[in-house]
Image (cartoon, rainbow, N blue to C red):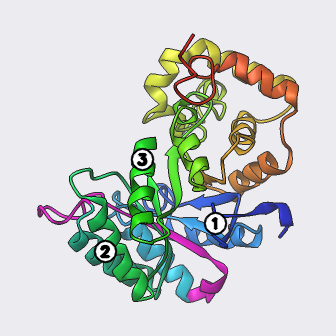
């Protein structure tokens, strides 16, 4: 299923990444290791080459567990050259004051730890998991320069950044003669359209790729009301989906009726919408079964019509007048 349209270049780089990324936050606690390995095998067989993780993932077992699972899978399968491996740094990894954040010390030591757990010599995309505005960009870029010179990191990305973070990062990198950020990973879905104001416009201006996490808002856009009624809800019965459901119950009900009219699963519709948004490079999915992967592939290969997109805009209107700031809220 290695169809050409499955791959795009990551921002301004020459790196080809799949439009679907296998997110691994559920590995450990929700997806056992044997099932996780089967999922990674299945995703790779379907042409998904981007595997996204973080050093802190696996906390339900222990921090770093998810990277260890991926490392054992890579070692056993011998497919490292076929995988674009992305991980993250920045969340606390211990109780000490230097075991978190984006200091040069923590970035470099955390990278060494991730390489060991992942059982690999290099990380394709090393992402700043959260902004640490107490650390100047010169220090962050100095640490990344060291790792890149050692061949341990190929590209740098950010996650959960503001638009002005992206601008600050790129301006400082350009002054240093460095490429800067290749990607930004942000929360974006039908319910959370704020990235359209500044994050995505900034990424497009600097030719930074955009990965989207939680495209279904923790399962809320994946048929939550139907699953709750059936007693089959998992993600939609916990986390950010719970308060959001109470606040948006009527529109979620209308959304599920609309999806039923289309004869499509709500999860497919929600993911298809994100994949068709301007500036979006890849969708980070968090499947627990191969069937979830199949649904994401259908979302990719069966885009929504203009009329269907307009209906979704009516159900989930953009912020203000839509489009980038400040025009979105100016009269």
Which residue is rendered at x = 46% and y = 27% of the image? 242
Q: Quadrant of residue 73?
A: bottom right
Is residue 76 positioned above or below 158 on the image? below
Query: x, y percentage for residue 248?
Result: 55, 17
The mark that comes first in sequence, 3 or 1, is 1
Q: Which residue is mark 2?
A: 143
Whole-number angstrom distance, CA of label 3 to CA of label 2: 19 Å
**Does any portion of residue 29 appear in the rendered image?**
no
Q: SS class of the residue under badge 1? A: helix
Which residue is rendered at x = 15% and y = 65% of the image? 98
Is residue 81 positioned above or below 141 on the image? below
Reply yes or no: does residue 157 show up in magenta: no
Reply yes or no: does residue 80 show up in magenta: yes
The mark that comes first in sequence, 1 or 2, is 1
For the residue pair 56 and 238, the one nearer the viewer reads as 56
Q: Which residue is mark 3?
A: 161
| Numbered label attached to residue 39 | 1
Q: Which residues are magenta?
A: 76-101
Q: Quadrant of the C terminus?
A: top right
Horizontal relation, residue 202 to residue 54: left or right: right
């Amino acid at each position: 299923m290695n169809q050409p349209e499955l791959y795009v270049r990551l921002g301004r780089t020459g790196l080809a990444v799949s439009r679907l990324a296998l997110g691994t936050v559920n590995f450990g606690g929700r997806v056992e290791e044997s099932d996780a390995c089967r999922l990674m095998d299945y995703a790779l067989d379907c042409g998904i080459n981007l595997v996204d993780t973080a050093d802190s993932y696996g906390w339900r077992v222990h921090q770093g567990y998810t990277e260890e699972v991926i490392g054992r899978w890579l070692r056993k399968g011998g497919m490292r050259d076929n995988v674009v491996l992305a991980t993250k740094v920045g969340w606390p990894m211990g109780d000490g004051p230097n075991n978190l954040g984006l200091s040069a010390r923590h970035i470099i030591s955390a990278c060494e730890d991730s390489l060991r757990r992942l059982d690999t010599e290099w990380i394709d995309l090393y992402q700043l998991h959260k902004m640490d505005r107490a650390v100047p960009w010169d220090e962050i870029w100095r640490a990344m320069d060291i790792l890149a010179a050692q061949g341990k990191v190929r590209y740098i990305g950010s996650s959960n950044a503001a638009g002005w973070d992206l601008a600050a990062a790129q301006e400082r990198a350009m002054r240093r003669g460095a490429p800067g950020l290749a990607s930004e990973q942000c929360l974006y879905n039908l319910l959370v359209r704020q990235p359209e104001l500044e994050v995505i416009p900034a990424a497009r201006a600097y030719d930074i790729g955009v990965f989207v996490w939680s495209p279904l808002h923790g399962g809320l856009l994946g048929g939550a009301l139907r699953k709750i009624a059936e007693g089959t809800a998992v993600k939609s019965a916990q986390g950010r989906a719970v308060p959001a459901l109470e606040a948006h119950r009527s529109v979620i009900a209308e959304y599920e009726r609309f999806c039923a009219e289309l004869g499509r699963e709500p999860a497919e519709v929600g993911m298809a919408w994100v994949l068709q948004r301007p500036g979006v490079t890849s969708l980070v999915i968090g499947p627990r079964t191969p069937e979830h992967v199949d649904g994401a592939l259908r979302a990719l290969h069966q885009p929504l019509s203009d009329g269907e997109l307009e209906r979704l805009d009516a159900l989930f209107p953009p912020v203000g007048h839509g489009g980038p700031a400040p025009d979105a809220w100016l009269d």
